Amino acid sequence: KAGVTQTPRYLIKTRGQQVTLSCSPISGHRSVSWYQQTPGQGLQFLFEYFSETQRNKGNFPGRFSGRQFSNSRSEMNVSTLELGDSALYLCASSLGTSFYNEQFFGPGTRLTVL
Amino acid sequence: DAKTTQPNSMESNEEEPVHLPCNHSTISGTDYIHWYRQLPSQGPEYVIHGLTSNVNNRMASLAIAEDRKSSTLILHRATLRDAAVYYCILRGGNKLVFGAGTILRVKS
């Protein structure tokens, strides 16, 4: 069974640009969550989608948005990039939204903003 | 979000058991205790979870205190591949709220 895949793996952008990251969950998984990891703040929850609906959102500005498609694939978008958006962005999928559902993480997309 | 407290780092010898503690005194009755680990240059990986009873799987064991205010992740025989950051997480919703975790170093 293929794991969670994220594309691209590495990305370099400049301030003010926007970026779209993609996540393909494990086949059969309907829940996709996004996390940001930085050395200073650690791992922080961005948002979660289930059946194309955003179910949960973390404490991030509106520049961060996402969506989920009918095949459960998800994208996240960051507009008007700032230097502080440089981070590893991780996507995780799970079968459902129950508290005991294990989340499977992808390898992440390393975003560098210059 | 309920918080957990873990030691910043721990060290273990290869082939020996490791006990990673976690305090979660504000846990609510419906919070599950999850453990994830993150190996260098990888995304986090699920290790184990439990609610009230002790749990075992192929990777580790989870011992949960009777009052549920603390738990311990047990790696029965540490290997060099177990060197990672271990996160203890209380999960009362689908999102995972990560703390700083414990850096586990394994010496050969």
Image (cartoon, coloured by chain):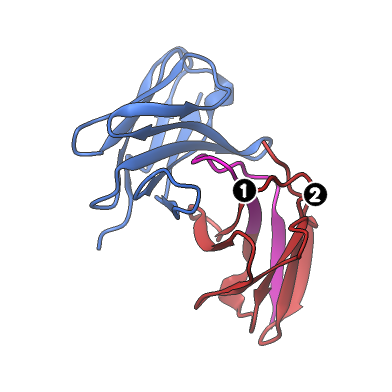
Chain colours: A blue, B red
Q: Which chain is indicated by disc 1?
A: B
Q: Which chain is indicated by disc 2?
A: B
The residue carrying mark 2 is B25
Earlier in the chain: of badge 2 and badge 1, it is 2
At mark 2, the secondary structure is loop
Instruction: Give the class, few, some or many, for how many residues have Cα within 10 Å of label 2's Cα (few <14, many ≥20).
Output: some
**Nearer to me, A69 or A53:** A53
User: Which x, y percent locates residue A57?
Assistant: 49, 26
The residue carrying mark 1 is B31
Q: CA distance from mark 2 to mark 1?
A: 12 Å
Q: Residue at x 40, y 15 (%)?
A: A17
User: Which x, y percent locates residue A37?
Assistant: 56, 39
Amino acid type indicated by mark 2: Ser
Q: Residue at x 56, y 58 (%)?
A: B40
User: Which x, y percent locates residue B43?
Assistant: 48, 52
User: Which x, y percent locates residue A34?
Assistant: 44, 36
Where A30 sits versus A17, above or below?
below
At mark 1, the secondary structure is loop
**Nearer to me, B101 or A17:** B101
Q: Is residue A108 left or right of residue B106?
A: left
**Nearer to me, A55 or A22:** A55
Q: Which residues are magenta?
A: B86-108
Amino acid type indicated by mark 1: Asp
